[in-house]
């Protein structure tokens, strides 16, 4: 779908009519409106909202840009987290397996009721089980919270206040800046750009930022003051202030977008590094405990000789 729409965008940029696009791409739709609705599905309403302010070519360019960024970020996150998650599941499953088989047989064979190794083994499994249960509960609660606009906005504000420049803030600011840049480049006013972004239901955090900024503008604040008061990362505010000072906002937005890509990678790497510390700690502890369980029968047999 993305490759097809990229081709459509390239043809539109070259000045092709819709009839020419139909022939080249082989689409069977009778109008651009129909092709958009069949292509975007649930996002078609959002596309139509953007189309009130931008033409089809500008809308497609923005959608493809955001879609590419989301796909690249999702793929990058998946690649980085796949291996540590596998190690987590494997070590936890190994502990449970050894508890139900080897440890149980050792306890039964040698009539062991209390042993430091056995106690440590059981406590580790209990603690890990609690950690994973809490993690699942937190994820479920977050999914429930993020489905409601009020609690979702409160969560975003709370996270921004407690941990400035967190991964969610940096990621959201990056999308917000890119969409705002496309709007400004298209020639629409700042207020109309924010009105459009405020209605992007597919990206609620971007809508939240745009709504806050638009609210401060309607109160009589300047755009510079308004953009400095919303819940974006600190680097974005610095770049925007430089842009207003130099009267070159688009250039500073371009500079920030390049910076944001590297900064987002840095934040993601740091978060994955914290997770890796827990993963390798669990793995090392599991190896030590399994080795001690294997040594129990050997120690008992050696003491009998």
Image (spheres, rainbow, N blue to C red):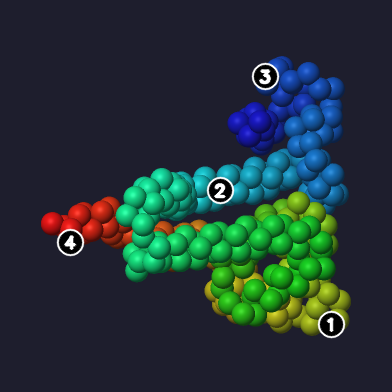
Q: Where, quadrant-wise, is the N terminus in this rendering?
A: top right
Circle 2 sits on which residue? Answer: 74
Circle 3 sits on which residue? Answer: 24
Q: Are marks 4 and 3 in contact (CB under 8 Å)?
A: no
In the structure shown, which secondary structural element does the residue marked by tag 3 occupy? helix
Q: Position of residue 292 (x, y in %)?
A: 28, 59
Distance between the alpha carbons at the discs numbered 1 and 2 = 39 Å
Q: Nearer the viewer, mark 4 or mark 3?
A: 4
Q: Is residue 136 visible in the rendered structure shown here?
A: yes
In the structure shown, which secondary structural element does the residue marked by tag 1 occupy? loop
Q: Position of residue 28 (x, y in %)?
A: 78, 18
Residue 17: mark:
none
Q: Nearer the viewer, mark 2 or mark 4?
A: 4
Q: Nearer the viewer, mark 3 or mark 2?
A: 2
Q: Residue at x 61, y 31 (%)?
A: 3
Please tell me how crowded label 2 is: few (under 14), some (14-19), or many (20+) other residues with Cα within 10 Å.
few
Compared to 27, does 213 lie above or below? below
Horizontal side of 150 relative to 109 (left or right) equals right
Distance between the alpha carbons at the discs numbered 2 and 4 = 56 Å
Circle 4 sits on which residue? Answer: 303
Q: Where, quadrant-wise, is the C terminus in this rendering?
A: bottom left
Label 2 vs 4, first from the N-terminus: 2
Circle 1 sits on which residue? Answer: 220
Q: Position of residue 251 (x, y in %)?
A: 57, 64
The image quarter containing residue 60 is: top right
Q: Position of residue 290 (x, y in %)?
A: 32, 55
Please tell me how crowded label 3 is: few (under 14), some (14-19), or many (20+) other residues with Cα within 10 Å.
few
Q: Residue at x 63, y 34 (%)?
A: 2
């Amino acid at each position: 779908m993305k490759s097809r729409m990229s081709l459509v965008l390239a043809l539109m940029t070259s000045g092709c009519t819709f009839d020419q696009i139909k022939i080249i791409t082989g689409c069977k739709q009778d109008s651009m409106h129909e092709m958009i609705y069949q292509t975007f599905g649930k996002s078609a309403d959002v596309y139509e909202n953007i189309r009130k302010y931008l033409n089809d070519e500008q809308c497609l360019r923005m959608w493809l840009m955001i879609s590419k960024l989301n796909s690249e970020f999702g793929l990058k996150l998946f690649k980085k987290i796949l291996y540590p998650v596998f190690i987590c599941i494997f070590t936890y499953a190994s502990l449970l397996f050894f508890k139900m088989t080897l440890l149980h047989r050792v306890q039964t064979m040698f009539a062991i009721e209390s042993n430091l190794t056995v106690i440590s083994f059981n406590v580790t499994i209990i603690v890990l089980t609690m950690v994973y249960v809490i993690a699942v509960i937190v994820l479920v609660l977050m999914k429930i919270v993020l489905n409601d606009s009020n609690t979702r906005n409160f969560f975003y504000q709370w996270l921004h206040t407690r941990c400035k420049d967190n991964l969610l803030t940096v990621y959201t600011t990056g999308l917000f800046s890119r969409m705002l840049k496309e709007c400004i480049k298209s020639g629409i006013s700042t207020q109309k750009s924010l009105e459009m972004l405020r209605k992007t239901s597919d990206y609620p955090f971007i809508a939240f930022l745009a709504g806050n900024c638009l609210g401060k503008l309607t109160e009589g604040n300047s755009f510079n003051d308004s953009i400095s008061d919303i819940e974006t990362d600190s680097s974005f505010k610095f770049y925007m202030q430089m842009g207003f000072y130099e009267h070159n906002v688009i250039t500073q937005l371009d500079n920030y977008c390049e910076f944001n890509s590297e900064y987002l990678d840095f934040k993601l790497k740091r978060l994955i590094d914290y997770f890796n510390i827990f993963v390798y700690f669990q793995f090392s502890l599991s190896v030590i405990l399994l080795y001690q369980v294997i040594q129990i029968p050997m120690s008992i047999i050696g003491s009998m000789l």
